Image (cartoon, coloured by chain):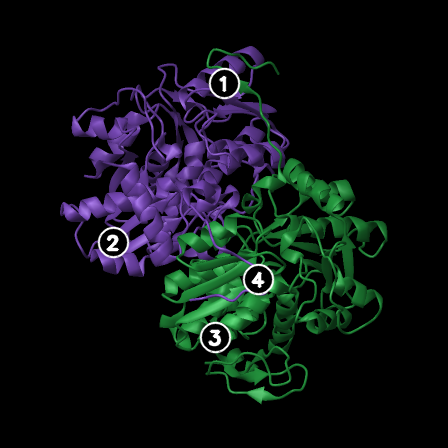
Chain colours: A green, B purple
Amino acid sequence: MFVSHLGCPKCHKTYESNRKIQLCTCGSPLLVEYDLQKVKKSLTKESLPQRRNDLWRYRELLPVREEKNIVTLGEGMTPLLKLHNIGADMGLSNLFLKDEGIIPTGTFKARGATVGVSMAKELGVTALAMPTNGNAGGAWAMYCAAAGIRSVIVMPKDAPSIPRKECVIAGASLYLVEGLISDAGKIVGRAVADYGLYDASTLKEPYRIEGKKTMGIEIAEQFGWDVPEVILYPTGGGVGIIGIYKALKELQELGWIGPRMPRLVAVQASGCAPVVRAWQEKKTESVFWENSQTVAFGINVPKPLGDFLVLDAVYATNGCAVAVTDEEIMDVHALLGRREGLFVCPEGAATLAAVRRLVQEGWIEKNERVVLLNTGTGLKYPDSVDARPPVLQPSDSIKL
Amino acid sequence: MFVSHLGCPKCHKTYESNRKIQLCTCGSPLLVEYDLQKVKKSLTKESLPQRRNDLWRYRELLPVREEKNIVTLGEGMTPLLKLHNIGADMGLSNLFLKDEGIIPTGTFKARGATVGVSMAKELGVTALAMPTNGNAGGAWAMYCAAAGIRSVIVMPKDAPSIPRKECVIAGASLYLVEGLISDAGKIVGRAVADYGLYDASTLKEPYRIEGKKTMGIEIAEQFGWDVPEVILYPTGGGVGIIGIYKALKELQELGWIGPRMPRLVAVQASGCAPVVRAWQEKKTESVFWENSQTVAFGINVPKPLGDFLVLDAVYATNGCAVAVTDEEIMDVHALLGRREGLFVCPEGAATLAAVRRLVQEGWIEKNERVVLLNTGTGLKYPDSVDARPPVLQPSDSIKL
C-alpha cells in the first residue's frame, strides 16, 4: 500500500485514506497522495513491459490495497496512433491520437470506473449513486455489476441513448431527468442524503481521478518516458486533464520523466466554454455557463467542480484553453473517418478542431509532438453519421 | 519475409505469395504457409513482452513484407477475462472470455482487416469489394480509408445499422441488398468481374485468415503457452475457428506449445446451423441452409465457403459443434451484463449458451479451462437491450 493520505488542494487539510470520504470540509475535491519514495523501491519503469497489459500495471500508483478488490474488465494501454494523413495535410510531422475508444464500455470513463468501483468495493460500499452525461454512468454501472454493487444512475433525457442500454443490461437503477447534468446532480444529492448512498459524482469521491491519471502515465510510457510537447483534452468535468497533470507531476517526482511538462490544452465547445472564458480572463475559477448547448454532449458541463484544478494545470504548463464550434467539430469528425479510418466521438474530434486553430495561430509548431485524446468510440454516437445507401435487388449490378 | 508460399488445403497445389491471387484453380481457399524454421531463428516467445502491444508483435507469423505497408489502428492483445460470477454459478472454476469488443471497429473483424488491407496495399490494390453481414464491411472500410484504398461494400438490408455508419464515415461505396450475405456475394462477384476489383470476400483472398489466427496466438500467450482445454467460437463464415486452429498448429511446429490441442467448438444458431448438421452427420462439408434466420446476424451464413476447414478443425481436436436457440442466446446475453458487467454481441453470447449446454451434458468438466470468444461489443447492437427508464423533473426525488 503506497497511499500516504488524502489531501485538499485548496485548504491543505489532510485525511486518512482507508475510509469512505467525499469532499473536504471546505467543499473542495480531495486528491490521493502517495509515498513516492516507497513507490520507487517497488516499481521501476524497466519492469513494466513484463507486467499485465492494462492500467493495473501501475499498481503502486493506484490506491487499491488488496488485489482481490480489483474489479477489471481489461481496461487501459489504449493505442497511440500516428495520424499520417491528416498530419501531412496540416503540415504536422508528429500528430498522434490516443484512442480511448478501444477500452471496455468504449470511453475513457472505464478508467475512472475500474479504480473508483474497486475502491468502493474495498471500502465496503454496497450501493452508490451518480449523475452523468451518459458514458460515466454506463461505465460505472458495468463495473458495479461485476463487483456486485448496486448503482443508481441519473442522466439528462437528451443524453445519447446507448449508455442507457449499458445501464439497463448492467442491472442499474436508471433515471432520466428533463434538464442538464447539474439537475441530475441535485437529484443524486437528495438520493444520497435520503438513502445513505455512496456519492460517486465527479470529484466527490477521490479515486476516479486516479484511474483517469493513467492516461498520462501511458502517454509517457508510450513515448519512451520523453513526453510530447502538447496534449489536447476535451474538457467537461475536467477530470481527464486534472488526472494527466497529476500523473506527470508524480512521474517527475519519481524521476521517470524530466522537468519539461507538455503544454496542456483544455478544449471546450463554444456553446459551453466556462473554462475557456475563465482562462481568457485569467481567472482561477469559472462561472456557471447559462443555456449551454453542444453536439459534444459529454463536455456540456456548465460549471465543473474541479475548474480551479483544470485552470491550474493549464497555467502551470503554459498551456491554453480553446473553444471550437459544433460545425468545426463535425467537420474534422468526418475528416478522421475519411482520412484515417477512425470513428471518434464528437468530444474527441473537438481536439483536432482545436489543433487546426492552434496551428493557424502559430501556437503549435510544425515539428512538435502533439497528442489528441479521443475520449470515446464513435460507435456510441451512431446519429453523428447520416447513412442512406442505395438498396439493390439480388439480381442488380453495381454501377461504379 | 517468412512466407514460403500459398497452398491449397484441398488439392495441394502451391502458388507464389507475392502477387494478387484469389482462390485455387480447384475453387478452394488458399492458405499462407511459412518457413517456420526461419521464423524460429528470428522470433522467440521470450522476446514478445518487449514488443509492440498489438497483433503485429507476431510480425514473423504474418504475411506483410515491408513495415511501411502495415495499416494499423492499434488492434489486438484483447483482454482475457475470468468470469468469476457466472463461472461460480455454473460450477466452473476456470471460465474465461476473450473480449474482442475491445478492438478498433468493435469486433474481431479488425484483425482480418488490418492484415488483409495491409497485404492489399503491399500488392498495389487500389480498389476492393466485399459482401458482409456488417462488421467485416465496417472494419475493411475503415482500414481501407487509412490505406487510401477504395472500398465497395455490399450488405443485407436487414443487417444491424451501425456498421453502415462506419462504411459511410470511412468514405466507402456502400450498397444494401434485399437478401442475405449470399446475395450480396453475387453482386460483389459481378462488380469484381465488371471493374477488375480485388475480391476481399471471406476466404477469397488468403490473408484475412492470417489476421484472425492471431486470436489463437494471443490465447496461447495469455495462458503462458499452456493452452486451455476448450475454446468456443461463434461460427458463421468460420474464419475465426479456422484461423485459431492454423495458429495452434504453427505454434506446435515452433515448439511453443505442446502436442495437446484445445477442443474447438463451433457454435451456431439453431436457425442457421449448416456446420452443426454436417458434424452431426459426420460429413466433411455442409449443405446450404434454407431460410436461415437468427438474432445473431453475424453467424447467419447459410453455406460457408470454408466449411470443410471448420469441420476439419473440429474433428482433429476432438471438438464438437453446437446449435443454440435465439432464446438461449438472449438469456445469457442479459446474464453477462448483470453478473459480469459485459455488454457482448449476440454471437459472443451464443458461446456461453453452448457452454451451459455442454456442462449439462458432461462434455465440459468442472475444472477445465474454457475460453469463450466474444467476437464483438454489444455497443454495436443497442437494439439488443430494451431501455425504458422513468423520466424525472429536476425537483423530483428518487424512491428506492
Disc 1, SS: helix
Up the image or down, B7 lies above or below B356; here it is: above
Check disc 1: other Cα within 10 Å, few if <14, some if 14-19, many if 20+. many
Identify residue type, mark 3.
Asp
Q: Nearer the viewer, mark 2 or mark 1?
A: 1
Q: Position of residue A110 (x, y in %)?
A: 51, 60
The N terminus of chain A is located in which quarter? bottom left
Identify residue type, mark 1.
Val
Front residue of A386 and A347: A386
Question: Which mark is on residue B188?
Answer: 1
**Distance Cα–Cα, label 1 vs label 3:** 61 Å
Question: Which mark is on residue A218?
Answer: 4
Residue B385 is left or right of residue A39, and the answer is left
- The chain carrying label 1 is B
- The chain carrying label 3 is A
Q: Nearer the viewer, mark 1 or mark 3?
A: 3
Q: Position of residue B294 (x, y in %)?
A: 34, 32
Q: Is residue A294 visible?
A: yes
**Distance Cα–Cα, label 4 vs label 3:** 40 Å
Quarter holding residue A156: bottom right
